[in-house]
Image (cartoon, rainbow, N blue to C red):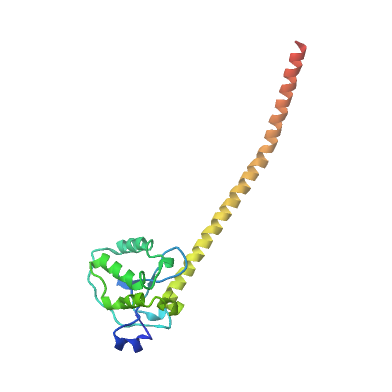
Amino acid sequence: MAYWINEFTSTLGIGVFHSGIEIYGREFAYGGHPYPFSGIFEITPGDASELGETFKFKEAIVLGSTDFTEEDMERIVEEMGKEYKGNAYHLMHKNCNHFSSALSEILCGRETPRWVNRLAYFSSCVPFLQSCLPKEWLTPAALQSSVSQELQEEQEEEEEEEEEEEEQEEQEEEEQEMWKPECLALYQHVQVFQRSVAVVETMR
């Protein structure tokens, strides 16, 4: 994927590119968000519209083949998500192109072409460059949707846990109420027994 700005910078030999890895008819990519969970997301291969208006499809590059199955692929992506978290995104050191290259090397033993991530090198020379980029370049629309879904699922899980805790508390209270008559009766028997013992001792 390429950004509109590349129309002006391509003649200089540099470009701002977003990349992903397509395999088994699915495309996996990485972007930044402020939360400590995976920033890896999935889109329809080559569909720039899912990323946002600033993205434009450039080209697909065949990198090789892999012996990994689709199930293997899902496990690999899940494991990589522990390293490529949304809040770990960094334009120079851990961006979408770093992810694509790392995943490509795992799958077929080959990195992505160097020119794809050339911006990372130039940004290391211009540290404030990341702050100049629009937020949607760092967090594509498809990833924003994925993040929203992840947050919603976490919220639902928290609500379910709270409901379970409330139900457990209510059940404990009901059990306590249920045992109250038995406890009272037992207490009365103990009192009677103690009085009986006291009477016997007095008679001695």
Q: Residue 191: where, in percent of width, then height?
A: 73, 26
Q: Residue 111: where, in percent of width, then height?
A: 25, 70
Quarter holding the C terminus is top right
Report whether residue 78 is seen. Answer: yes
Q: Residue 114: where, in percent of width, then height?
A: 26, 76
Which residue is most to the top? 204
Q: Quadrant of residue 69?
A: bottom left
Q: Total marks drawn?
A: 0
> Nearest the camera: 145 or 31?
31
Image point 76% across, 17% down: which residue?
199
Q: Residue 33: where, in percent of width, then height?
A: 45, 70
Residue 50 horizontal side relative to residue 59, left or right: right
> Nearest the camera: 46 or 116?
116
Image point 74% across, 19% down: which residue?
196
> Nearest the camera: 147 or 136?
136
Q: Is residue 63 depicted above or below 178 in this figure? A: below
Quarter holding the N terminus is bottom left
Q: Quadrant of residue 19?
A: bottom left
Residue 95 horizontal side relative to residue 198, left or right: left
Image point 45% across, 63% down: which residue?
36
Report whether residue 25 is seen. Answer: no
